[in-house]
Image: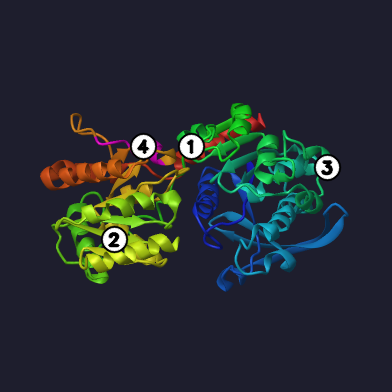
């Protein structure tokens, strides 16, 4: 099949979150399955020069946009990486501002242009995909443009899939603002499609209505977003469209996240020698972060954006109770000053037992996965989550809340059957988080053989993109048929 991916970010060119990982890994997995794949992205000013230097000019044209039909330049720059073709849309007026996302008022015109230009360049290059796979609200207008402004052109035969990575962000703005910049027909600005309320429109809502299929990044999250608690105001809309909604859990890039080849680690290891080599990584982590160097201590890692969504208020509430002389806590991330300051405070209160590294450091993230015994992911909600998958790959046992993809990928430890691959809690409650951590520590210190067995079991677990890619291929084939 021929599949076009349209999204606002993609590793290694530009990445702010999990969307960038999916836009990178899923096309590569599909390419390995024999599909022909193109990824369409904006040519942001912030893309590193080393990637821009390899771009090849493929042509340009003028495209009308807005209610009054203003014309804008569309340039096409292309590169190929690992067999996947990447087409960048060049327009300095929209994309030469630095960061991918600036402010919603400015981003609405930017992604109206991007959605329409993405379809226009496919027609221009005469590369007509079987399926157009769009991602999040920034590409949500693609299905609407396809069925209106591009109807009767070669691209009309393509089917559309729209994936929800995080429903919290929807592209909501005034009806007048979106109507002007999109130039879409007035009939779409009604409640079944783009209308949010009397004065506002919702780009994501419109895309969900017009896409041929809707996916999200785990089966549990697909169910959760149809409820008021998780639906972010679109639960009724999603229930109405539930017949075309499904969840496919993400994978991770197992070449990038491979403890046996990871050059960033103090000692590389696999499931056969993990017990010996992980201890070396723990010692190196303790040394580099100023923690007391003791392989007998249990190290709890936390690699996260420091926001409410990630359950940091629960960690804040229980952290003093974790410091018992046998446990150390390592935090890596940036975000809400409330949490940044809280973890800095705990580092000062418990020197040698707590480290708060308030920054983004890719190398240190790898080292925390390798040097930690367990990883905390107590999220309020988590569409899929990648940290728990990486943790298992590196032999760090995940301690998670049962929500979204965390529930789908982490099976709670069962002492009677000696099964499961982590420790979980259901309700969003700090006492239940502490209880899950206490259970993990009990197994770690009192029955190390079973703990080590779980570590090896986790490292054998298939967390690659291959299974997910096969499910997406099945979905695409049902559409093409």
- Residue with the most extreme left position: 446
Q: Position of residue 481 (x, y in %)?
A: 66, 28
Left or right? Give the position of 478 relative to 143: left
Q: Earlier in the sequence, mark 1 or mark 2?
A: 1
Which residue is label 3 attached to?
A: 185
Q: The magenta stretch spans which residues?
A: 406-413
Considering only order in the chain, which callout, 4 or 1, is on the residue closer to the N terminus?
A: 1
The location of residue 29, given as percent across then percent down, is 50, 46
Tell me the crowding category of disc 1: few under 14, some 14 to 19, or many 20 or more residues within 10 angstroms, Cα based: many
Q: CA distance from mark 1 to mark 4?
A: 16 Å
Q: Measure the C-alpha gap from mark 3 to mark 2.
A: 53 Å
Q: Earlier in the sequence, mark 4 or mark 3?
A: 3
Image disc number at residue 89:
none
Q: Nearer the viewer, residue 411 or 59?
A: 411
Identify the residue under disc 2. Answer: 330
Report the residue marked by disc 1.
Answer: 221
Foreground residue, 66 or 387? Answer: 66
Among the 4 quarters of the image, the one containing residue 140: top right
Image color mode: rainbow
Tell me the CA gap for discs 3 and 1.
Answer: 32 Å
Dot 2: what SS? Answer: strand
- Dots 1, 4 in contact, CB < 8 A: no
Residue at the spot of label 4 = 427
Secondary structure state at the residue bearing disc 3: loop
């Amino acid at each position: 099949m021929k599949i076009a991916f349209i999204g606002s970010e993609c590793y290694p060119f530009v990445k702010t979150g999990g969307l960038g990982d999916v836009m990178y890994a899923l096309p590569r997995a599909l390419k390995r399955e024999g599909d022909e794949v193109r990824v369409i992205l904006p040519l942001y000013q912030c893309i590193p020069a080393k990637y821009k230097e390899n771009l090849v000019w493929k042509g340009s044209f003028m495209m009308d946009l807005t209610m009054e039909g203003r014309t804008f330049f569309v340039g096409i720059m292309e590169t190929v990486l690992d067999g996947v073709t990447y087409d960048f849309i060049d327009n300095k007026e929209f994309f030469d501002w630095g960061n991918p996302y600036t402010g919603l008022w400015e981003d609405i015109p930017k992604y109206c242009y991007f959605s329409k230009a993405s379809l226009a360049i496919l027609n221009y290059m005469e590369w007509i995909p079987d399926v157009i796979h769009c991602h999040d609200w920034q590409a949500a207008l693609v299905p609407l443009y396809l069925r209106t402004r591009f109807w009767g052109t070669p691209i009309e035969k393509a089917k559309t899939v729209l994936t929800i990575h995080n429903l919290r962000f929807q592209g909501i703005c005034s009806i007048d603002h979106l109507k002007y910049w999109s130039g879409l027909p007035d009939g779409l600005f009604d409640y079944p499609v783009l209308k949010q309320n009397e004065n506002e429109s919702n780009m994501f809502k419109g895309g969900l209505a017009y896409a041929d299929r809707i996916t999200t990044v785990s089966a549990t999250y697909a169910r959760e977003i149809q409820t008021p608690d998780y639906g972010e105001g679109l639960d009724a809309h999603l229930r109405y469209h539930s017949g075309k909604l499904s969840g496919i859990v993400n994978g991770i890039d197992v070449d990038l996240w491979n403890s046996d080849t990871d050059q960033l680690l103090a000692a590389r290891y696999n499931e056969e020698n993990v017990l010996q080599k992980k201890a070396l990584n723990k010692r190196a982590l303790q040394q580099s972060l100023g923690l007391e160097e003791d392989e007998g201590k249990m190290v709890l890692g936390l690699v996260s954006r420091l926001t409410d969504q990630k359950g940091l208020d629960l960690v804040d509430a229980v952290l003093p109770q974790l410091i018992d002389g046998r446990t150390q806590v390592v935090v890596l991330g940036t975000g809400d000053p409330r949490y940044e300051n809280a973890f800095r405070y705990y580092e000062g209160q418990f020197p040698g037992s707590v480290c708060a590294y308030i920054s983004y450091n890719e190398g240190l993230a790898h080292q925390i996965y390798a040097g930690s015994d367990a990883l905390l992911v107590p999220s309020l909600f988590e569409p899929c989550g990648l940290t728990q998958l990486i943790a298992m790959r590196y032999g760090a046992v995940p301690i998670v809340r049962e929500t979204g993809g965390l529930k789908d990928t982490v099976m709670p430890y069962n002492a009677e059957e000696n099964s499961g691959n982590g420790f979980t809690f259901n309700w969003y409650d700090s006492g239940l988080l502490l209880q899950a951590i206490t259970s993990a520590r009990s197994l770690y210190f009192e029955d190390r053989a079973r703990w080590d067995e779980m570590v090896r079991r986790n490292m054998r677990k298939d967390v690659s993109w291959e299974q997910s890619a096969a499910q997406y291929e099945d979905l695409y084939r049902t559409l093409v048929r």
